[in-house]
Structure formats: C-alpha cells, structure tokens
Image: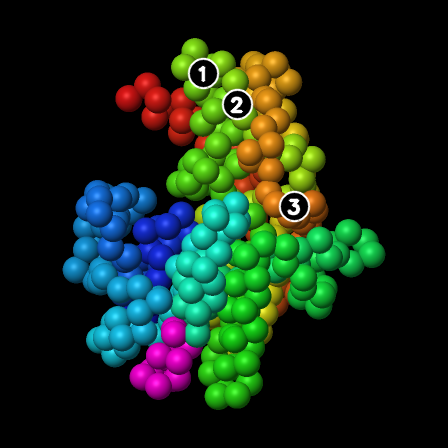
Amino acid sequence: MSKKRALVTGINGQDGSYLAEFLLEQGYDVHGILKRNSIAENQTARLNDRTYARIKQNLQFADVTDMASLVRVITDVKPDEIYNLAAQSHVKVSFDQPVYTVQATGLGVMNLLETVRLCHPETKVYQASSSEMFGNNMDPDGFQREGTPMQPVSPYGCAKLMAYSLVRCYRESYNLFLSNGILFNHESPRRGTNFVTNKVALGAVRIKKGLASELRMGNLDSSRDWGHAKDYVRAMHAILQMDTHDDFVLATGKSRTVRDLCEYVFGSLGLCYTDYVKVDPRYVRPQELNHLKGDPSKFLQKVPFDFEYTFESMLDEMVAYWMEKIDE
C-alpha cells in the first residue's frame, strides 16, 4: 500500500513544522511549500534537523498569493491531503499591513481552492481558520461555538472570515472535501516572540538572567483560550480522516487573561510580575478582542481526543526553552 501524500503550506511556521513531524510519524510522504525570503537560514529554521533531512527534497518555493506557483506544485505533488497553514498571522501587524494580510490570508485561500478545483479536485483540504473571526461575539454562557455569529475586529480576523466563507462556498458548490478548523490560540517554544505567550516567556527569562529590567505589554485583561500547537496539529490531521467534511472549533474550553499568563510565567521563575510588567499604549490594538473561550464539543464527539498539554505545562516548556537557549 502506497504512503499517503500530504502537502503543507506554511511548513516552516510553528504549526507547519509540528505537523510535518507528526505526519512523518504517521508514515506520510510529506511535501511542503516555503515562501522565499532574503535570509536563507530563516526559510527552514523551525524544522528540526531530522525532519529537514527527511523532507528536504520535497520542499518547493511557492506562495499562496501566486496562483501559478500553486498550480505548479499541486500538479507536481498530487497530494491526498493539503493543510493550508500559510498566512500573515499576527493580529497587530494586520493593522499595519491590512492589504497584504487580506491578500495572503484571504485571497491566498481563493487561489488555493481554485487550484484544487481545476487541477486536483480529489484531494482533501484542511483550512486553518481562527477564533479571531468571532470578534467580541459569544454565546450567553461565554463560549464561542461553530454557530456563534462572527464579527471580526481586526483585518486579520476579516481575512480569516473571508477564507472560511470561501471554503464553505467551494465545498457546497463543487462537492470538494474541504474542512475548516476554527483554531483558538495555540502556542509553543516555536511561536514567534512577537506573540504574547513567547514574548512573556522570553521577557521574563531575560529579566531573571539580568538582561532586562522590565517588560512592556498591551492590554493585560484580554482573555484567551490557550493550548499547545502539538495538540492542535493532531486535531488538524484527525479532521481530514473523517468520512465527511465539516467545520470544527478546536479549543481547550478554558480561558485565562494575559495577566494570568504573566503571573504564572514570572512566578515560575520566582518573580512577581507586577514589579516588571509595564503597560505601554503602543502595544494596545486599535480595536481590542476582549474574550475568547471555545467549545470543542462537536469535534470531541466525532473523535476520541485527549489534550496532552495543560496551560501550565505549555508555559513551563516555553520558559525552559528560553532558560536553556539564552545560556547557549
């Protein structure tokens, strides 16, 4: 029996690199799309040496904003499964670069779907949707679910809602196997340090080691549903193993504030966050998303799934990574 073949866009991102490792463990033939940049080392930086050695020959330069490059790659690879993880994924940056965010995160999905329809309609596609699509809407009990009205409050959230809607449109119009995973916040040591969890982990470690005296932050009272990226990539894979396509919230069902995050990380290092964390208006978004807490019941009813990480063990891993990294 031949191996399943998967194509991962954004394979050098946090999620893409963990997904590549997981798919290799499952016996997949893994292919990836890289976006070229001016620093060669950055193009595969999150892929560990073992993973890179196994898939080096299967990496191709392309861009979801360039449909011709997608046609070339998908026609060449003929994947059984596509995981679309490529995006401009930073919410604050989306206010600085709204046009590019919509091009990469919204129109890029249009290019991918049209390429699949025309060139390889039998493939299954997973689209990484986002809890940012909900904006400040929630159900009366404080949760967001698949049926919760969506009203995003950032260009990033708007672009993700565009992509989500296109997936649903193409699924119904052309009978393609397309599924959305509505991912709530998921983190790891591979998360960029401009994202709040790793910003806090790195900042606290630098203070502990005497390399910094303060950490400047935005809104400390925003609450998020945080999980570990390793758990979420397993869930992505599970969605494409189902018999039918659908849309699923992927979340832990627990919400904590940025203040809680700071308190735990600094406390794990024997520090009091109030001595070091300073609120800086420069890091406050033009329009704030106040509360996210997802209900993963629909997904869990379909798939026997256990989250391997807690909020605390995820942060412990991130702090340990920076404690070791800064000593190198």
Q: Residue at x 45, y 27 (%)?
A: 202
Q: Are marks 2 and 1 in contact (CB under 8 Å)?
A: yes
Vertical order, 101 against 315 (above or below): below
User: Mark 1 to mark 3: distance in Å?
Assistant: 28 Å
Task: Choose top left, top right, bottom left or bottom right for residue 36.
Answer: bottom left
Mark 1 or 3, closer to the camera: 3
Residue marked by disc 2: 215
The kind of residue on which mark 3 rests is Glu
Q: Which color scheme is applied? A: rainbow
Q: Residue at x 48, y 88 (%)?
A: 174
Q: Are marks 2 and 3 in contact (CB under 8 Å)?
A: no
Judge left or right: residue 306 versus residue 203: right
The quadrant of the rendering that contains the C terminus is top left
Q: Residues within 10 Å of mark 1 (few under 14, many from 20)?
A: few
Query: Which residue is more in the foreground, 260 or 232?
Result: 260
Residues shaded magenta:
111-121
Q: Is residue 120 magenta?
A: yes
Q: Residue at x 67, y 40 (%)?
A: 222
Vertical order, 152 against 286 (above or below): below
Residue marked by disc 3: 288
User: Mark 2 to mark 1: distance in Å?
Assistant: 8 Å
Vertical order, 324 against 283 (above or below): above
Give x and y (percent) for residue 158.
57, 62
Question: Could you say whether the residue bearing mark 1 is in a helix, strand or loop?
Answer: loop
Residue at the extreme bottom of the image, as rendered: 174
Q: Main secondary structure of the magenta part?
A: helix
The kind of residue on which mark 1 rests is Ala
Question: Could you say whether the residue bearing mark 3 is in a helix, strand or loop?
Answer: loop
Residue marked by disc 1: 212
